[in-house]
Amino acid sequence: MAPARTPLDDLRREIDQIDDAIHDLLMRRAAVVERIGAAKGNGAAEAGAAPIFLRPAREATILRRLMARHAGTFPAQVVVRIWREMITAFTRMQGPFAVAVYAPEERRGFWDVARDHFGGFVPMTAVNTPAAALRAVSEGTATVAVVPYPAEDDADPWWRFLVSADAGRPQVVARLPFGGRGNARGENRDALAIAAVPHEPTGDDRTLLSIEIGGDLSRGRLKDSLEACGLPPVSFCTWHPAGHAIGMSGGGPSVHLVEVADFVAHADPRLARLTERTGDIPVRVTVVGGYAVPLALG
């Protein structure tokens, strides 16, 4: 005689049914992603361009929408982690995807941050310098580079390699971690993801500007000019190259990386107004990317 079914048995059966439903939806989502990948490929072929499968702005929008509707006791950070695994897996279904991470032996925490964001099964390669990670993206051996968030005391800043007029150049596309810091090792310094994909708005964004100055313009005056042009600066990093900045003239050259609290497109008219405000001092402004503001999770 079979043992009597208990309330616990009924609950476990309900869990099994929920698991089956989740699995069915995952397979359904995968089928939709396959159609999206095919549509992107067809559209790119018609335009004579390579398809773009990585969409960091779209990913951020998905996660923000989910967090806005999330309720109950299940940890929000775990929801983000589950979806991050899914997002990268579905992206890899559409085309090649690999990550180059600045993670020398003494700074393995960046590897953990990259793994948490891009998933535990994406191909990842550790490199010893940020420049090597950027080079992997430029050469096509990696889709994304993960490098340290810039610091004022960086003697040889990696971000100077992003200053280019090439429309297809790699640029900043995300800030990590996006959904809260997990159990990454080492220092708690954030990272930036770099990829050769478009800089797109999400509604709550930061933009990184490279501002090359060929003369004597103080940081305070530059800050005032940015604010007057509607480009509120959040942070500055400054690099003084050994020689003059490319294409610039005058004394005291410097290059500033300025984080602005807004989305700024490459052709944003505020950038032209900024160069006009500096008068005779030559200034060149380049958008080197940006990111969706990470989620504020406890």
Image: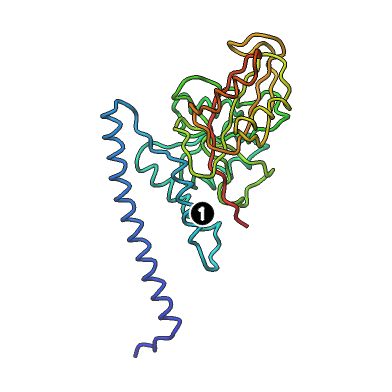
* Residue 165 percent location from the top left of the image: 49, 19
The answer to which of 293 and 112 lies nearer the viewer is 293
Q: Is residue 115 above or below residue 214?
A: below
Is residue 87 found left or right of 191 in the rendered image?
left
In depth, the one of 209 and 13 nearer the eye is 209
Position of residue 116 measured from the top left corner of the image (x, y, whole percent):
54, 48
Q: Position of residue 81 (x, y in %)?
A: 51, 53
Residue at 65% of width from left, 46% of height from top?
185
Position above or below: 35 against 208: below
Question: Residue 275's quadrant in the figure?
Answer: top right
Q: Quarter of the image holding residue 209?
A: top right
Image: 144 above or below 118: above
- In percent of width and height, residue 13 lies at 39, 76
Quadrant, the C terminus: bottom right
Query: Residue most toward the bottom?
Result: 1
Please give the residue where the numbered disc 1 appears in the rendered image: 80
Q: Give SS at disc 1.
A: helix
Colour mapping used in the image: rainbow
Viewport quadrant of the N terminus = bottom left
In the image, what residue occupies the spot 44% across and 27% down? 140
Q: Is residue 90 above or below residue 137?
A: below
The amino acid type, in three-letter code, at marker 1 is Val
